[in-house]
Image (cartoon, rainbow, N blue to C red):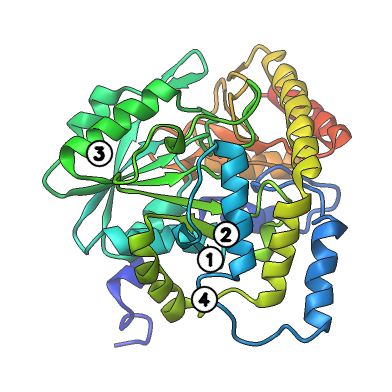
Amino acid sequence: MSQFDSLSRRALQSPESGIVAVVNHGRLKPGLIPLWAGESDEKTPDFISRPAADALLAGETFYTWQRGLPELRQALADYHARLFGRELPLDAFCVTGSGMQAIKIAIEAVTNPGDEVLQLTPAWPNFSAALGMSGGGSVAVPLDHVDGGWSLDPDRLAAAITPKTRAIFFNSPSNPTGWTATREDLVAVLDLARKHGLWIIADEIYTRFFYAGGRAPSFLDIMDDADRIIFVNTFSKNWSMTGWRIGWIVAPPSLIQVLENSVQYQTSGVAQFMQKGALAALEHGEDFVHSQIAKAAAARDLFCDALTGTNRVVTRKPDGAFYAFFRIDGISDTRAAAIDIVDRANVGLAPGTAFDAGGATFLRACFLRRHDHVEEAAGRLAAYISSL
């Protein structure tokens, strides 16, 4: 038996990222405009980086609070009070090594091997893959798609519940579709969770990127303290900190010690100097967040108008997040198309095959970039589409 064959089944079955496969194909191509990853093209601003660098140089390099520095958790509590009008105790927060780790910790907290979690699709693939590596199963519940727009059918979600169902993973605003749950959607989902004793893992990472103004509706608007909801979040999107790998969890205070234990046995906490950067983001970053939202809103209009202007693309301007999720007439194999678009149009897109059920015939583009790049990328894609 080879070393490879002796690996665990869970490791062997972990899927290659369909997004990374395209990135690896075109990463070094000169002049390519990369719209494949979910991140801004702006570096982390100095008001965040400098406090982290200063803390590093000052020797803040030792073991620290595993659930997060008290001052950072207090800043998170203050941030949630400002944004959601909800006072949460310090012990409702746990700092994690990325939003992805927050998701993995939440999965392991509420599921056992063999359990199932419902997930609205098309969906960011990392949740279902992480759940599979923990021995669980993701059950796809497709959103309705009509004329480029997406909507939730609560009855379809209810019909997917079985005795194996342990939780609902709920991402709104959605990556990749941009669909954003209404307050009525959230009430319906929370009612289902209460009725069946399910947990909700609420991925509200894109809450700030909501183009109707303000922020997107949240379970924090409607929940009671007794509700079984774990919120997962990250500093990556709002403050251009994707490479920092720092996030947080909001959960019932009675759970935080259990979640901290998971941090202990995975990473033993987030570096103290990085937490100082995160603290600066919360305390001084509102103007930057608003500038990012305005940048995304203008780019959304520019990019989507250019694509729909070809009369060969089916999409709508998304309600939230910062992705265009679109279908090009005549293209069914989007993985092959994404490679071809890299080669012929010099634009990097994520193939819809990476986004679980219902996404296979779509392509995703992140438009949170400088507007001349967005305009150039849209022009290249329009030319590519006209050549088909």
CA separation in Å, label 1 and label 2: 5 Å
Residue 274, image quadrant: bottom right
- Lower sequence index among marks 1 and 4: 4
Residue carrying label 1: 96
CA separation in Å, label 2 and label 4: 13 Å
Q: Amino acid at mark 1?
A: Thr
Q: Is residue 358 above or below residue 38?
A: above
- Asked whether residue 53 is in view, the answer is yes
Residue carrying label 2: 247
Residue 368, image quadrant: top right
* Local secondary structure at mark 2: strand
Q: Amino acid at mark 3?
A: Ala
- Lower sequence index among marks 2 and 4: 4
- Lower sequence index among marks 4 and 3: 4
Residue carrying label 3: 193
CA separation in Å, label 1 and label 4: 9 Å
For the C terminus, the quadrant is top right
| Residue depicted at 22% across the width and 63% down the height | 112
Residue 101 in the figure: left or right of residue 22: left
- Lower sequence index among marks 1 and 2: 1
Residue 17 in the figure: left or right of residue 69: left
Residue 340, image quadrant: top right
The numbered dot on residue 66 is 4
Question: Are the two marked residues, 2 and 4, in contact with CB atoms closer than 8 angstroms?
Answer: no
